[in-house]
Image: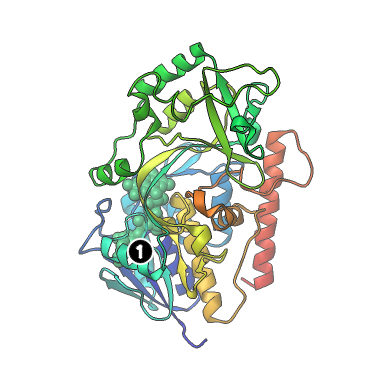
Amino acid sequence: MNIKKVSVIGAGLAGCEATYQLAKRGVQVDLYDIKPNQFTPAHSNPNFAEIVCSNSLKSTDLTTASGLLKKELELFDSLILKTGYNNSVPAGNALAVDREKFAEEITKKIKNFKNVNFISKEVTSLPEGVVIIATGPLTTDKFSKNLKEIFNTDSLHFYDASSPIIEASSIDMNIAFVKDRYDKGSGDYINCPMTKEEYLNFYNQLISANRVELKDFEKKDIFEGCMPIEIMAKRGPDSIRFGPLKPVGLDNPVTKQKYYAVVQLRKEDNINNLYNMVGFQTNLTFPEQKRVFSLIPGLANANFVKYGVMHRNTYINAPKLIDKTFQLKQNSNVFVAGQLSGVEGYIESTMSGLICGINAYKLINNQPLINLSSNTMTGAIINYITTCDTKRFQPMNANFGIISPLPEKERDDKIKKQKIVDRAIDEIKQLKLNIGD
Ligand SMILES: Cc1cc2nc3c(=O)[nH]c(=O)nc-3n(C[C@H](O)[C@H](O)[C@H](O)COP(=O)(O)OP(=O)(O)OC[C@H]3O[C@@H](n4cnc5c(N)ncnc54)[C@H](O)[C@@H]3O)c2cc1C
């Protein structure tokens, strides 16, 4: 291939990271954004890489999933991460940034590259050649409409209404039990049984818990598609007991006891590490989800690797459309990065932009593209979004439930996490050595 130019659409977190990875390697980049003349409903800063909500990029503690992902990005010389550290504000173990200064510094750094040509316009169709699409969760309507045709599928979603996901090892199996309704199935469900008293206690907390305020631009889309569990519950004390918490066909397999209500958890991945709370789409705040859902018998110490969310979010059905390199299966010249690719979160979006940038560079230089294993947090997220069930796909963030388990058993959680971290760092260092990066 003779082209040494790449078009990046969207100068958000993913687009800026991709641009930086390309530009510093000498590639000519055409970077497009609707800014500063136009804005999505959540953006207002004319600078690039605008952080639209919380200014926290989460924990820097290496033994947290988010801390490990940051370390991996640091090893790859991430622009977003180093600019984050340059503009950090005190936030304990978390990396929080002064969003104005952060966006200003990134914009300056990107514009300083002589080989980056910034074009302010709304992209509505794909430019020629190698392209990275990074237009984010609020991709403009016109482009979204055309993306549906470009992807030749109905696999473009416009909002995310997903239930919480729980790490299997944190479910108390002395209380919960494995059973499919009427024993029809292959043991895909874990059931959390409730007595009447437990149910009513849970119910009363659920209907009075704090909810996230939806933005004006989100209200119509989201509730047309899906009803949150707490809203369904407000219809009356029996509403969810005759809905998602229906106990019929779920008697205890050993004691044969019948229950007043049952919360079902369904396998979320192929290695039985993660379980999804069936029918628990919710708009409760994250601390309230932790508090209220921990009242469910068996979930007192549950580790929620992802809380339920209901928000406006444009994203693709990743397992259907993209490879582990972030290239479209049907057109390897097109990469999809950021929240649009099916990852969730600031740092996760940055990670996908970084991998797309490096891989687009490798593509135009006829070099093998990089592909990290699930021993790393980067590789684990990519593996999850590209291999999970297409029918149940929902965006994913960094968490230890998706990373490959250690080959040996390790009881001490701290030592276990440290070993996982060391293994991930070694793999990335080795990869960088192998590719001479
Ligand atoms: C309201 C809201 C709040 C969020 N809060 C958080 C949070 O607190 N923490 C967290 O971790 N994640 C949060 N997210 C999720 C996600 O991490 C961020 O949206 C993140 O900025 C995504 O990065 P990105 O690069 O994919 O997209 P963005 O950062 O949104 O960048 C996309 C860029 O593309 C441009 N663009 C869009 N359409 C076009 C077009 N047709 N042509 C040219 N340019 C275009 C936009 O102007 C924008 O600059 C939130 C998302 C939303 C929508």
**Looking at this rendering, what residue extends furthest in the left direction?**
37
**Looking at this rendering, what residue extends furthest in the bottom direction?**
2
Percent x, y for residue 355? 53, 64
Label 1 within 8 A of ligand 1 by Cβ: yes
Residue located 68% across and 22% down the image:
174
Residue located 38% across and 31% down the image:
284
Q: Quadrant of the C terminus?
A: bottom right
**Looking at this rendering, what residue extends furthest in the right direction?**
408
Percent x, y for residue 231? 34, 29
Q: Is residue 75 above or below residue 23?
A: above
Q: Which residue is mark 1?
A: 11
Give amino acid for label 1.
Answer: Ala
Which quadrant of the view contains residue 74? bottom right
Ligand 1 position by quadrant: bottom left
Residue situated in front as seen by the camera: 117 or 210: 210
Q: Is residue 99 above or below residue 27?
A: above
Count of numbered badges drawn on the protein: 1
Percent x, y for residue 264? 55, 31
Q: Disc 1 on helix, strand or loop?
A: loop
